[in-house]
Every structure is written in structure tokens, then in C-alpha cells.
Image (cartoon, coloured by chain):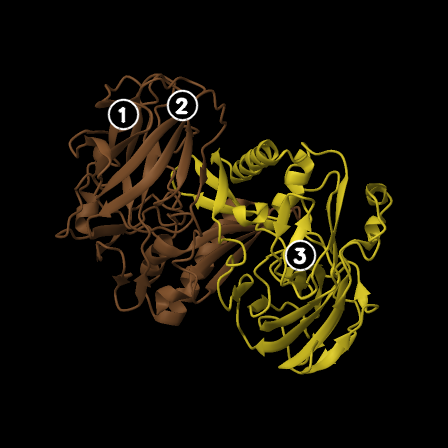
Chain colours: A yellow, B brown
């Protein structure tokens, strides 16, 4: 997929969690293009043959492996990596799960659930979710980050100012991402590839899917960037918005509770309108629905909205 | 503008704050269409001749007047109003202000600022913001709500489950809004019309602009709706997204702090790239930039993104 790649980070070259002491698997010059053969967030523990029972047997120590780290010559603390997201080669297989204890509504959905996806590798067709849903695809890497400066191991789950498990669905082909560098060489790793996800990733998983990723990695000296930022090449929801949106809201003094109310409202609505099981509505919402902050200034109550694209319902 | 209107709520028929004891100014049958001649959120205190000094002289007791209330025959607590937003007749004049003590970054912007807009009433052309910005317009009513059940006066500023000062920029022409009813007759009022606003309304004001609004108001009996919800007729950002977005992020355990970091980051970026004064960047961001929750499940850190549409910069 990557004619211009000077390096390949093969699928075996991955690690669990962040640690500045992990030995780089490649050293590159700024401006070079690198292919990452990313495994899915289960490290291959969920397969086409998996059932919901396999979720309970997963080894948590193997969650969310990332390919790397890649040492970028000349990168120093205070610089930024400028990462052009060249493209993705999706595998055609994916999964979405409700994992007990994880997700925005973990208290309301205590039981595990698993949906397996088979999708068009060319991503020209939406992916079917039973008889009800057709989800337009837009692949991206959920986890892309540099090593934190603080020594010792760090969980891969929370994102940080150096990036990591950002789960920003707009980090798709054509986007240029800037990440703060905190250690010499930056130590960039990539993984957790998703075939589609909505803003929020509300159930805790997307369409988790192994795929290859091509990135051109450049360096901005002395960028003094506080947080990651990015530039998209074009519209971010064009693949979803042709038929408009069903929108639920949560209103109150706490954004988290507002988000929970908005998503709960959408699950109720989707279940009532389609007959879908609530946990299926929750998972479907996670892969295509968007959490937006409509209003954050009319004290003491804020409005959080959850936008579900009607095109998914056909 | 409203051929099908059976009632007009004239500009003098407005009130300040919510109170179920306010006498209705019209009684309508479900399904009727009503024109609301809305004043702006300053109640006409900001005019084409205003300067920033006028902000300090504003009478706070006159903030955010709403036209109404309209009594809907047959509406009872537990029902919902189904409000089809038929259209807007914008005035062509608007204002955006940084009002001290109000807005997401009130601590960083203590001084008042005022921008006056003159825009195409047909909203075919974007509105100019100095030499730098061209803001595509999409009018809506910032405040649309039923009377709360709790007796006595209630501030108009916070939105509630019955609606009110929702400031949801997708409540534009073609959207169908459902609002919970808490009192007999619903007692619907409308105001705070905006020519454009981004998700969040981050500086606390939008393009505040007087305009007429046409709504068809229907009733859904026994709807048992927890929070407002709505259905959009089509895409919600198509007017903004042709040239993609500049996006800044805020990452951490608190969504409010994440939102503040993302917006601060955008103000820094816009100021650096255009030479714009930071308070101008803040106001421009408020009328066209979107706060999104990219990730709300990777505990303990969430990602809030602020999307600024590049088309605004030409």
C-alpha cells in the first residue's frame, strides 16, 4: 500500500503501554514515510470465530498493543512531530464490544456483548450491523503517540499531551497531526486501528480492526505545543450526514452527566424506533454517533448533544 | 415571510425570565403555524451605533427577552411539543460581544469587546469579520422553551429540560424539535435569535441578531420525554466544512478544563497565524467553531476537540 515507505514496523514489533526505556525498533530521518502493520486492540485475541464468552477470557495485559517505538533523528523535548496521515489498508474484519466496567454507561450495561463485522476492504460500502444498520467507514488509528517523559511504565489507556490513545476519529487519511515531543527521538508508536468510530467512542470500543497505516513523520523544532492539534484535509462528517441526524440532549451543570443523558436518550430512541436490543443500540451509537457540546456558557447548565446519523438506518 | 401563519407574536409581546404565572399572549390549536418577531438578546440596547462602552451600560434586567408565552390548547404535563422550525427572516444586523464575567474563558478575557455585523439578509453570502474572517450564516433561535413547572420566576440564562436558552445551533430551518411540557398549555416562548454560532458558543455570544421566526407547533400526547430532542433535515455543518478544519485539543480528567484548553489553543493558533487580536479570535471562534467530545471512555483522561472551519479564513 505504501510506495514511498522507507521503513516497515512489522506486526511483531509492538509493545504494551508506554515507557521511555523501551528500545526503538527503527530510527528514521525527519520526512520519511513509515508503514505500521497494526494489530487490533485485542492483540488478535478476538477473531472471526470469537463469541461473547471470549471477552471474559481476554488477557488484559495484552490490551491495545502499539507498533514501535520509532526514533526520529533530531527530535528533542519541546519539538513537535508533524505526522501526515497518508493512508490505511484495512483488513475487512472488525469487532465491537461492550466490555463490563468500561464505557460511558458501564453502570447501565454490566453484561458483555460482542458484534463481529465483515466489511469491504476498499471501504466503498458501508458495513452492515445486522438488518438495521449500515455504517459508513472512515479508518483511523485510535492510538498514536510519543513516549511520555516521566520514567517507568504508563498505561496505554489514557491519552496524554504527547498523544497516545486519543481515539479522535478525524485522524483519518489526509489529516496532519502535530504531537508534542517530551523525550529525545520522540519515540512514536501507533496502533488501535478503527474502521469507524463516532465522537466520544461511547461504548468504549469502535470497529476495532487490524490494518496497515502509512505515516510521513516530520519534525517541527521548538514548536512549544501545549496539546496535540491537527488539520483535516476536508469535511469530517461528509460520509455520515446526507440524511441528517437524530439528536438527543443532556442538560445540566455537569458535562459528563449531560453526555450520559444524551447517549441514554439515544439508546432509548433507537431501541423504540428499530426494536434493537439496547446494548446493540449502544454499540452502534459508539461506531457512528457524535457527542457535541452545544452550549458551555449558559451557567449553570450546559447542553451536550448526541448526533446519530440517519443514513445508518437506511 | 410566513404565508401559513395563523398568529403573530409581535415584538412588543415579550417577557424576561420564565414564570408559569405570566399570562399567555396567544392561544393556539395544535398544528398551527406562528410567527415570532424576535428582538435580539440585548433587547435592542446594542444598535448599529453602539460602541464597546455601551456594553457596560446595559440593563441586565432586560437581557434575553423572549416572545410569548403561547398557550397550546390541550397540552398537559407529560406531553411534548413537536415544533417544526419553518424558517427565519433575518434583519441583516448583528453583534458579538465579550461580556466581562461571562463566557468559557471569562478569567482570561476580563475586558469588554464588541463586534458589529452587517450581513446579507438572504444569507447567501458569508458575513465579514474584519479583513480576516468570512462566516457562513445559518440562523436559529438560541432560546426556545416551555415554562418550567416550578412556580415563581426563573432566570432565562440556564437551559432546562423544558428547553429555554439551549443555544443549539442545529435548531435551524427544517429541524423538528421535541420539548417536554411541564405546565398546562406548555407556555412556549422564543427569542435570542442568532445568525450564526458554533457548538459551545464559547465566548458567550453568537451573531446576536433580531429576526422573525416561523414555527409550526404540534402536540405529542403522553410523550414522556426526559430531555429535548430533535431531528435535522440534513447535514449540520455543510455550510462550514468545504475546506476542512483546524483542530486543537484539550486532554485530561475534566471535560470543562479540556474544553477550555482546546479553545485556548485555538485562540493562540488563530492569533499566531492571522495576527488577529486574541479577543477577536475568541469571538470569531464562538460564531463558527465547534466543541466536540472526541473520546469520553479512556479513563481517566478525556479528549475535547475544538474544530475551526478553514473556509472562514478564505
Packing grade of label 2 (10 A; few <14, some 14-19, many >=20) is many
Residue shown at 29%/61% (left/top)? B126
Vertically, is A106 above or below B77?
below
Say which chain tag 1 marks.
Answer: B
Instruction: Estimate the x, y position of residue B38 in percent, counting from the top left.
Output: 22, 38
Residue shown at 70%/34% (left/top)? A109
Using the numbered discs, state the Cα–Cα distance from disc 2 to disc 1 in whole angstroms: 13 Å
- Tag 1 or tag 2, which sits nearer the N-term? 1
Packing grade of label 1 (10 A; few <14, some 14-19, many >=20) is many
Say which chain tag 3 marks.
Answer: A
Give the side of residue A43 with respect to residue A261, left or right: right
Circles 3 and 1 on the same chain: no
Give the side of residue A95 with respect to residue B278, left or right: right
Q: CB under 8 Å between callouts 2 and 3? A: no
Instruction: Estimate the x, y position of residue A271 in percent, counting from the top left.
Output: 61, 34
Instruction: Estimate the x, y position of residue A10 in percent, counting from the top left.
Output: 80, 72
Quarter in which the N terminus of chain B is drawn: top left
Instruction: Estimate the x, y position of residue B183 in percent, counting from the top left.
Output: 37, 18
State the SS at label 3. loop
Quarter-wise, where is residue A171 in the image?
bottom right
Instruction: Indicate which disc residue B70 carries.
Output: 1
The reply to whether residue B301 is visible in this rendering is no
Using the numbered discs, state the Cα–Cα distance from disc 2 to disc 3 in whole angstroms: 42 Å
The reply to whether residue B242 is visible in this rendering is yes
Q: Residue furthest left?
A: B49
Residue shown at 22%/56% (left/top)? B117
Instruction: Indicate which disc residue A165 carries.
Output: 3
Instruction: Indicate which disc residue B181 carries.
Output: 2
Vertically, is A275 above or below B50?
above
Nearest the eye: A169 or A308: A308
Quarter in which the C terminus of chain B is drawn: bottom left
Packing grade of label 3 (10 A; few <14, some 14-19, many >=20) is many
Amino acid at each position: 500500500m505504501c510506495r514511498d515507505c522507507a521503513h516497515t514496523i512489522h506486526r511483531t514489533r509492538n509493545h504494551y503501554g508506554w515507557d521511555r526505556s523501551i528500545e526503538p525498533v527503527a530510527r528514521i530521518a525527519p520526512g520519511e514515510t513509515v508503514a505500521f502493520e497494526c494489530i487490533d486492540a485485542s492483540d488478535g485475541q478476538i477473531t472471526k470465530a470469537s463469541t461473547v464468552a471470549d471477552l471474559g477470557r481476554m488477557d488484559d495485559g495484552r490490551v491495545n498493543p502499539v507498533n514501535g517505538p520509532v526514533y526520529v533523528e533530531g527530535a528533542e523535548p519541546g519539538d513537535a512531530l508533524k505526522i501526515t496521515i497518508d493512508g490505511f489498508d484495512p483488513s475487512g474484519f472488525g469487532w465491537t464490544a461492550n466490555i463490563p466496567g468500561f464505557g460511558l454507561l458501564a453502570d447501565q450495561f454490566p453484561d458483555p456483548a460482542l458484534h463481529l463485522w465483515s466489511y469491504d476492504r476498499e471501504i466503498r460500502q458501508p458495513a452492515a450491523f445486522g438488518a438495521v444498520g449500515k455504517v459508513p467507514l472512515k479508518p483511523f488509528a485510535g492510538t498514536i503517540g510519543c513516549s511520555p517523559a516521566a520514567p517507568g511504565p504508563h498505561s496505554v489507556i489514557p491519552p496524554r499531551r504527547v498523544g497516545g490513545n486519543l481515539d479522535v476519529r478525524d485522524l483519518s487519511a489526509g489529516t496532519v497531526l502535530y504531537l508534542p515531543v517530551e523525550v529525545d527521538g520522540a519515540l512514536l508508536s501507533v496502533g488501535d486501528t478503527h474502521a469507524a468510530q463516532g465522537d466520544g467512542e461511547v461504548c468504549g470500543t469502535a470497529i476495532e480492526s487490524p490494518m496497515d497505516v502509512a505515516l510521513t513523520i516530520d519534525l517541527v523544532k521548538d514548536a512549544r505545543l501545549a496539546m496535540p492539534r491537527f488539520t483535516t484535509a476536508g469535511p469530517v462528517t461528509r460520509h455520515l450526514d446526507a440524511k441528517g441526524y437524530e439528536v438527543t440532549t443532556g442538560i445540566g451543570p455537569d458535562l459528563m452527566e449531560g453526555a450520559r443523558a444524551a447517549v441514554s436518550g439515544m439508546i432509548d430512541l433507537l431501541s423504540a424506533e428499530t426494536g434493537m436490543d439496547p446494548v446493540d443500540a449502544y454499540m452502534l451509537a459508539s461506531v457512528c454517533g457524535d457527542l457535541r457540546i452545544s452550549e458551555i456558557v449558559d451557567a449553570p447548565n450546559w447542553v451536550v448533544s448526541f448526533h446519530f446519523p440517519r443514513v445508518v438506518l437506511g
